[in-house]
Image (spheres, rainbow, N blue to C red):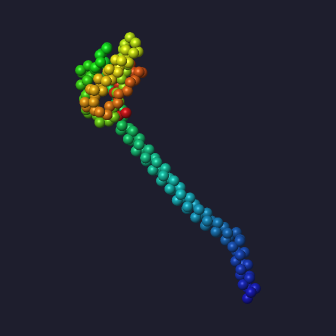
Amino acid sequence: MNKTFLNCIFSLSLLTCTGCTSTFISDSLAIIEREENRENSQVVNTKVLMSIQALRAAQKMAQHTHITTYTFTYELHDKELNYRNRIKLAKILVQNKHPIIINIAPAKGESQLQQLSLAMKRATILRQYVERWNKGVTIIFAPDLSTDTIHLSIGA
């Protein structure tokens, strides 16, 4: 009986170490591994998909928020806009709830000091006029604009 028992154990160990049985076990392990990798790749793909959808939503929002610009001109040496431009500016300010930026250009003058002085006076008067309708307007000095103009940007 001991001999038969030892032969059984030897036969079983021989069968487990042979190619047939070990191939079956390795194939099973490979299938399990592939299933786990597929599940992991689906998680990664879901994350990538969510990122793509977020980018698309951001792009749609960016397309809907476009910038509208207007340019107004001052008469030579005037501190205020003419009546027609003030009315048009007031209508724009009342109708829009988006952020508004006004870039003011230097004025024409004999020296840079005169140009800056007149531009500052225009900015002060413009600020007082604009604050009647919209307190959220930003006025910025823009020396690169053509002289005696203001450039209004809505939605910036």
Between 140 and 25, the residue placed more toward the observer is 140
Toward the top, the furthest residue is: 110
Toward the bottom, the furthest residue is: 1
User: Which percent across, then down, holds residue 40?
Assistant: 53, 57
When asked about the image quadrant of residue 15, the answer is: bottom right
The mark total stands at 0
Between 120 and 152, the residue placed more toward the observer is 120
**Is 10 on the left or on the right of 47, as rendered?**
right
User: Which percent across, then down, holds residue 20?
Assistant: 68, 70
Q: Quadrant of the C terminus?
A: top left
User: Which percent across, then down, holds residue 72?
Assistant: 31, 22
User: Which percent across, then down, holds residue 28?
Assistant: 61, 67
Toward the right, the furthest residue is: 3
* Residue drawn where x is 28% and y is 20% of the image: 81
User: Residue 149: in sight, yes or no?
Assistant: no
**Is 26 on the left or on the right of 96, as rendered?**
right
* Residue drawn where x is 71% and y is 71% of the image: 18
User: Residue 70: in sight, yes or no?
Assistant: yes
Q: Quadrant of the N terminus?
A: bottom right
With respect to residue 4, does 114 lie above or below?
Answer: above
* Residue drawn where x is 46% and y is 50% of the image: 49
With respect to residue 14, does 140 lie above or below?
Answer: above
Between 71 and 20, the residue placed more toward the observer is 71
* Residue drawn where x is 75% and y is 85% of the image: 3
When asked about the image quadrant of residue 84, the answer is: top left
**Is 95 on the left or on the right of 45, as rendered?**
left
